Amino acid sequence: MPLFIAIIIIFFTAGCQNSLYTDKLVAGASLTYIEKPVKKNPVTSFDQYSELVYEKTERLSAALGTKSVLFNSSGSKLYAMNLEGMSVYEFDQPTRRIIREFKFKPTPGTGWDYVKEKPISSFQEKPVEACLSDNDKILWVSLHNAEGIVPIFIDSIELNKRSAAKQSVKKIIVLYPGTNKKDSFSVPLIKTGKTPKIISKTSDSKYLLVSNWHSYTVSVLELNSNVYPYAKVINNIPMAAIPRGIVVDDKTGRSYVAIMGGATISVISNSVWMKEDDINVESNPRHIVMDTSGHLFVSYNSLAKIACLDAETGKTLFTAPTNRAPRTIVLSKNQKFLFVTCYTGDTVDVFKVNDNSFEKITSLPCKGHPVGVDIFENENKLEAWVCSYSNGSISIFSFNKK
């Protein structure tokens, strides 16, 4: 991570004006610094900013129980996984409109009550998390109560209509809001383990990793987009307790798994797809992301804090408190800002990542238990799209780059 000599100027302004949603918010503090001359890799125009200045919040209608959101590589489309809605919404970023709804046909299944900690009657087809592979051609979706994941070819409806005997499938109806048009097809269900959550991939789209909450395993799948059902499980790696967040480091050939049911991050060797070590951390790590310098960023759900770790040594470099129940975290494209959804805190916390500390820039109200977040950026603006689980909305927090 680059070194900086920092001159920090923090200021706050107030305001929020939008026809869709208006609320009193405290604008994000701006951060200005003078960069120490160092040799570094070429950067894109997206990277060349040092301040984020809060501009406005918009709120879009989504589905109840939206669990996660994911942008495609270009940022033109966002996919929202609606757990309770049993569907996936495809949003158009420029217009904020739903282009398509991929709606699963429900079948009976067994779910889990996370408050009472017991099984409940439910449906199998409840999308949790997702991952795009093969140059954004395939959307992989974990189904909470189906013990597996499904692939959806999002750029070709016809490619979804392949089939094979004896393959378990899930039926999908595609709706096009504002029209009478419909499509339908079945997608293969690839079994991974009980209560699949996070899906992560290698950069070459040859392998997927899936964390299976109630199986205490991480499934490794070999991918082939040309051969139905497009993936096969090649290993189920035992974990010590409940796994959730996964990050794949192609540079070092390792993957890191947050053991939410314990106090470790498990390290997997990508050459043999076996666990090679554990990093001891604080309790209840939920989500992890990684920057290009080998730093891991972790959200500690029950402790209400975030941390930066050195992946090579396992050493915790610095931490910061957050609002209650930090869930999903995401880095800006220049890796200098970290966005944190705080589920019971009903906020989105924004931090500047300094060399040796987190600097909280702002904490923005976000009602309805925010849980998932992803970022759109262009040269002048950054948008954090945040889904709230209990009120069926997606909030878009816009910032100007300086």
Image: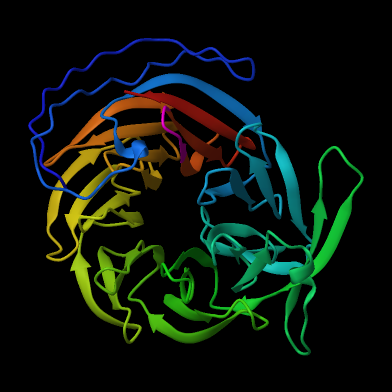
Q: Residue at x 68, y 65 (%)?
A: 153
Indicate the colouring scheme.
rainbow
Residue found 38% across the figure and 43% down from its top:
325
Note whether residue 31 is visible: yes
Q: Is residue 204 left or right of residue 170?
A: left
Viewer-side residue, 367 vs 287: 287
Judging depth in this view, the residue of 267 and 282 nearest the camera is 267
Relative image position of residue 194 (x, y in whole percent): 55, 74
**Residue 366 in view (yes/no):** no
Q: Residue at x 46, y 78 (%)?
A: 219
Q: Name above or below for residue 43 compared with residue 289.
A: above
Q: In the image, 306: left or right of 242?
A: left
Question: What percent of the width, then of the height, locates residue 201?
Answer: 45, 68
Name the residue rendered at 44%, 83% in the picture: 236
Above or below, comparing residue 205 to residue 331 in the picture: below
Q: Quadrant of the C terminus?
A: top left
In magenta segment, residue 267: no
x and y percentages locating residue 350 in the rendered image: 33, 32
Tell whether 189 sits left or right of 114: right
| Magenta segment boundaries in residue numbering | 376-380
Where residue 19 sits, quadrant-wise, is top right
Spot occupied by residue 288 in the image (x, y as percentages of width and height): 33, 56
Magenta span main SS: loop
Q: Residue furthest right?
A: 180
Q: How many marks?
A: 0
- Furthest residue to the front? 42
